[in-house]
Image: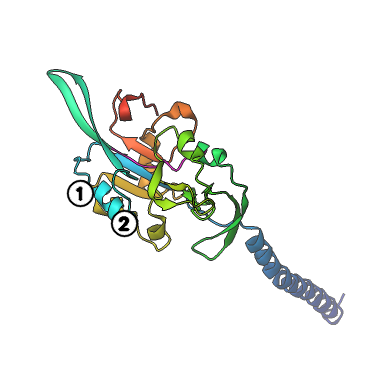
Amino acid sequence: MSDAQVRPIIRRETLKRLGVAVGAGALALVMGPRRVIEAACSKKPRLARYAMLVDLNRCIGCRSCTVACKAENQVPLGVFRTYVHYLEEGTYPETKRYFAPTFCNHCSEPPCVTACPVDPVKGVYKTSRGEEVEYERRATYTRPDGLVLMDYDRCIGCHMCVKACPYGARFVDPSRKAGGDPSNNTVGKCTYCVQRLDNGVVPSCVQTCLGGALIFGDLNDSSSEIAKKSRKAKVWKPKEGTKPNTYYVGLTHEAVLGEEVKS
């Protein structure tokens, strides 16, 4: 076969291959953005899981956290959202004193939420990226970022949540009436200073801790300090099965309020 006869065949094969390549490229251009859009639509919002860690080796018992909490949240006299326990262990002369701040544990399985008799309504939580997440909202409810909060306007003042909490972290607020039943008082508790968190600021107790004993952050961020340190920390009353999100470092065989704490 002469060169004159071979050249048209090569030209046709080349054009055919170019056509296939161009077609595949065009298809990729069309399908690529679609896949990106579909992936974006199917991707779940990235939610935080807030938690507190207390390093008892660093707590000096100054109670600045208690004072800061009262000032930030207008907590009335006689009740506390944050309380520092003075604890002792051992037998003289082998004794030790340490201090244990306690808060609402913002449990992952909170019995206070289950105990709330107020009918749930649909709530919408907006993430820092502007994504909206629906959740069930009672008078006591768990927000998608793990915070256990109160809707004071819907609270009926039954105080069932106070009785359900195995940590004594809730109290009847003597200065605030329940919105759902103004003849009763509503309930107070630690909120991890939600009003500050929603504005990108750490809880007031963390900011004022003189010994640097309080660490706050997002457990879902594996690179965060709290995510790393909480792996070896302990929780209060693990047998309750509430999965607390307040962790303690430095506890020995004795526990907060004299109860055994295990990893």
Looking at this view, name the residue that lies furthest to the bottom: 4
The spot of residue 98 in percent (x, y) is 21, 32
In the rendered structure, find residue 72 and report the number of the disc placed on it: 2
Q: Residue at x 74, y 71 (%)?
A: 21
The spot of residue 18 in percent (x, y) is 76, 75
In the rendered structure, find residue 210 and report the number of the disc placed on it: 1
Asked whether the residues under the numbered discs 2 and 1 touch, taking CB atoms below 8 Å apart as contact, a structural biologist would say no
Above or below, comparing residue 125 to residue 8 in the picture:
above
Q: CA distance from mark 2 to mark 1?
A: 17 Å
Q: Amino acid at mark 2?
A: Glu
Do we see residue 38 in this rendering?
Answer: yes
Do we see residue 223 in this rendering?
Answer: no
Left or right: 8 in relation to 203: right
Above or below, comparing residue 30 to residue 71 in the picture:
below
Which region of the structure is painted magenta?
Answer: 101-110
Task: Assess disc 2: are there few (<14), some (14-19) or many (≥20) residues with their C-alpha within 10 Å of its C-alpha.
Answer: some
The quarter in which the C terminus is drawn is top left
The spot of residue 262 in percent (x, y) is 39, 26
Residue 240 part of the magenta segment: no
In the rendered structure, find residue 78 and report the number of the disc placed on it: none
Please state which of residues 124 and 70 is positioned toward the viewer in this rendering.
70
Q: Residue at x 24, y 47 (%)?
A: 212
Q: Secondary structure at mark 2?
A: helix
